[in-house]
Image (tube, rainbow, N blue to C red):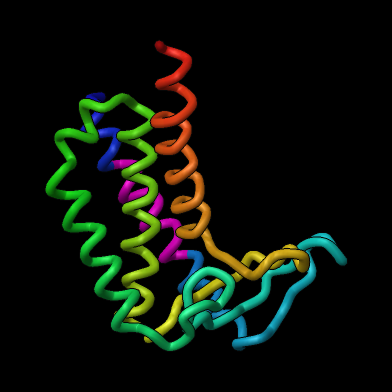
Amino acid sequence: MSGRVQAAVSFLGILLIDQLVKYYVEQTMLPGESIPVAAPFFHITFVLNPGAAFGIFRDQQWLFLATALAFFAVFAAFYERLYRSGSLIHFGSVALAAGAVSNLIDRIRLGHVVDFFDFRIWPVFNIADIAIVLGTAAVLWALFVQKKEIR
């Protein structure tokens, strides 16, 4: 399977899994409801997040929509260059884009993002957030650590 096909499968997989889990949470729980999974450390908690990470920029939907659309436009415009930049940058960017698009879908569809992973010591988050963080970490690692190791 080519790198482009793997990237498309990864992108769609992250997007679909995140959206399906969010839909399941929406259909089976009430906002604010929390189910202990490994009490007291881990719960599934249905949170409607109108802001960004840690709830910052609350109710600034225009900002989130514009940022996500601009990011995706840049991602699409530079995809060929990202593809040729090595697998960490390529797949990190794909994960980052998939997470951003999935949260964008929530904002367009619902006006907020559905979050559900609750470790009680960290703000509640979702699968798209994990993809964004891991994708960003992969790109930064490739740019700042891996490049130095090659030199």
Q: In the rendering, at what x and y percent does residue 31 appear?
A: 60, 87
Specify the quadrant that holds the N terminus: top left
Q: In the rendering, at what x and y percent does residue 47 appear?
A: 59, 80
Q: Which residues are magenta?
A: 9-20
Would you say residue 147 sits in the magenta stretch? no
45 in relation to 135, above or below? below
Q: Residue furthest top?
A: 151
Asked whether, in this view, residue 56 is left or right of residue 104, the answer is right
Give the main secondary structure of the magenta stretch. Answer: helix
Would you say residue 17 sits in the magenta stretch? yes
Residue drawn where x is 61% and y is 82% of the image: 29
Residue drawn where x is 41% and y is 12% of the image: 150
30 in relation to 132, above or below? below
Q: In the rendering, at what x and y percent does residue 65 appear?
A: 28, 75
69 in relation to 17, above or below? below
Kindly indicate the quadrant of the structure image that contains residue 146.
Answer: top left
Kindly indicate the quadrant of the structure image that contains residue 110.
Answer: bottom left
Residue toward you, 46 or 79: 79
Residue toward you, 146 or 77: 146
